[in-house]
Image (tube, rainbow, N blue to C red):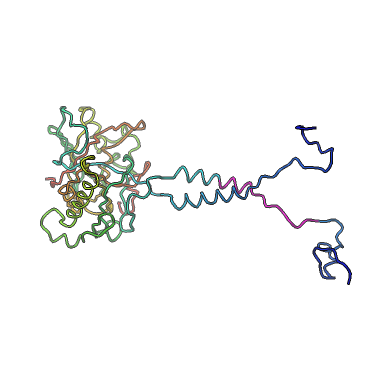
Amino acid sequence: MPIVIPGKRYSPRLAKSRLFGSGAHGKKSVVTDLLVTPLVDMFIIIVIFLLQNFSATGEILFMSQDITLPNASNGTEIERSPVVQISAEGTGENATPKAIMVEGEHVAQIADLERDEYWNIPALEEKLRDIKKRYEALHGADESFKGDINIQAHHAIPFSTVKRVLFSCNQAGFTNINFAAMRAGAASMSDIPGSK
Amino acid sequence: MAGGMDLGTKGGKRSLDTAINLVPFIDLLSAIISFLIMTAVWNQIDRLTVTQSGAPSSSDSPPEESKTLPLNLQITEKGFFVTTGEVSYDIEKSDGKYVYCLRSPAKDVIADPAKCDENSLVGVLRKIKADASDQRNITVQCKNEVPYRELVRVVDTCNYKDSSGKTLFFPDVAISALDPN
């Protein structure tokens, strides 16, 4: 049995091939380097873009399909505070108030509240009082309670619903109201679908 | 020659070109991109601060004793109604829309308050501010049927800032729960 040099051993047919076998005149490498420089450039651009848009505050509001925020162009950056949400069902002008939530937790159904003659919403008030008590227990006398609250309401709901929520917030001690709104550069409110 | 450049004259030839291994760098960038995309917040949400009329102010600074007008802005189904105690302005809707800046607009955008119509909300607020430059407070009353977005836009208009970030009108907005007459 002949001694064979270690390495690739092709079949007799391939051994004569120009590409693999000894039939080739010049040796041609089949290994090619992938040019990664444009890929690295692209990655760097993406990283810079994402870093510029990075927000360390994270999601403050609980985004929901039932709530389309109104637009505003002269607001200030939103801060972490308890969030009261007023959702709506339907779209455009036909949207009707649906439910009230605090920190994403369902508190009251608007349809049930319409029967009440008084302004406040007892369930909401109770929930907010709990939050206030918890805040005071945690912070003690070191830090005074500021009474900040974020209102995240659908743009088409009537003021009557907002008024009751504001009244309940006021009764519970949350007097510093912040209306959450989508930041709009020079956009008009008439750009909102259904506002025409 | 010790410490000199290898000219490749002695012994085996050694290439001066060295390829930097980019693979770990690409791995690092991929990890950063994945992290940033996962943690990205795409919605930019602002807040418009208001107080309730009659509620105690929670701001740290005590209220300044200054001569201020009893400035009141009512939002009704017909339009805006602004009163200063002495003078009142009625800004009726145009084509079923509230007039914030331009009466016959393609888009009612407040690009430049100086160019807004006189009989628009911005025009009236500008006129009142010119007469009472120290005034910062305004009370907003709203009819029950008025959509929430109109209230937000009115508050946004009262907080209007110029290019230098200076508030032009009345940033201390109080919402009154009372129904306008």
Q: Nearer the viewer, residue A79 or B172?
A: A79
Residue A185 found in image quarter? top left
Residue under the image location 18 percent in, 31 percent down: B62
Q: Is residue B134 above or below residue A150?
A: above
Residue B136, magenta (yes or no): no
Residue A116 found in image quarter? bottom left
Residue under the image location 84 percent in, 65 percent down: A17
Q: Position of residue A19 (x, y in %)?
A: 81, 62
Name, please, the residue furthest toward the front: B2
Is there any visible trace of residue B169 in the rendered image? yes
Q: Position of residue A195 (x, y in %)?
A: 30, 51
Segment tinted magenta in the rendering: A28-43
Left or right side of A39 for A91? left
Residue A32, magenta (yes or no): yes
Name, please, the residue furthest toward the bottom: A1
Left or right side of A41 for B181? left
Is there any visible trace of residue B106 in the rendered image? no
Quadrant in the picture for the C terminus of chain B = top left
Q: Position of residue B15 (x, y in %)?
A: 77, 42
Left or right side of B85 for A73? right
Residue under the image location 36 percent in, 50 percent down: A59
Residue under the image location 25 percent in, 38 percent down: B121
Quadrant in the picture for the N terminus of chain B = top right
Q: Nearer the viewer, residue A134 or B47?
A: A134
Left or right side of A80 for A7? right
